[in-house]
Amino acid sequence: MEKDPAHFVEEIRANVAFEHLVAAIVSGAALAGAIFFVLDFAGLLFAGALSAPNLLALILKSFTLCIMVFLIGFLAGALIVTPMFKALEKAKRRTVWPYVAAATGVTGFSLIAVFSLPNAGAPDVALMIAVIAAGLFIAFDFGRRMTPLWRAVERAEAQAVGNLRRLH
């Protein structure tokens, strides 16, 4: 049984989108770690608690946050964003806003899940700022990376169909 060539094109587009998403997730994870480090470092400076052990703990917490953001983003990309991308491509909705909404939902759910763990402690403002900023950055960076591809697909579709008028 042969597969439809359109199915192959759809899978290739989804794979390319996932690669761009992973690149955005890596950048967002690094951003989350950097924001968390800067905010907590400033807190240590203002509190007069800057010492070698506190700095080492801060570095390790920042690195842990990077890994967590990457893992949560990768899981969300595989389970949520890739199927959403396929559905949006079928509907020819090529904008960043559905991905911003998904990133906001994943970010909110992740923060609620982390802070509801036993012995999680009080919510850390620096952590919340870093995670929210990383989630939004990932969504907008993914949109920035995909915009040239979306425009190329629209041009190719317009040439294949002829005179195409978008209704939405």
Image: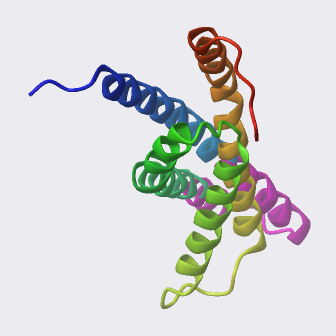
Q: Could you tell me which residue is drawn at 69 percent across and 66 percent down?
A: 127
Boundaries of the magenta span: 32-61
The residue closer to the viewer here, 75 or 100, is 100
Give residue 12's quadrant in the image: top left
Tell me if residue 101 comes above or below residue 158 in the rendering.
below
Percent x, y of residue 122:
68, 86
Give residue 115's quadrant in the image: bottom right
The residue closer to the viewer here, 158 or 101, is 158
Q: Magenta span has 167?
A: no
The residue closer to the viewer here, 149 or 120, is 149
In this picture, residue 88 sits left or right of residue 134: left
In this picture, residue 74 sits left or right of residue 133: left
Percent x, y of residue 105:
63, 66
Q: Could you tell me which residue is drawn at 57 percent across and 42 percent down?
A: 91
Percent x, y of residue 100:
70, 52
Tell me if residue 102 comes above or below residue 141 in the rendering.
below
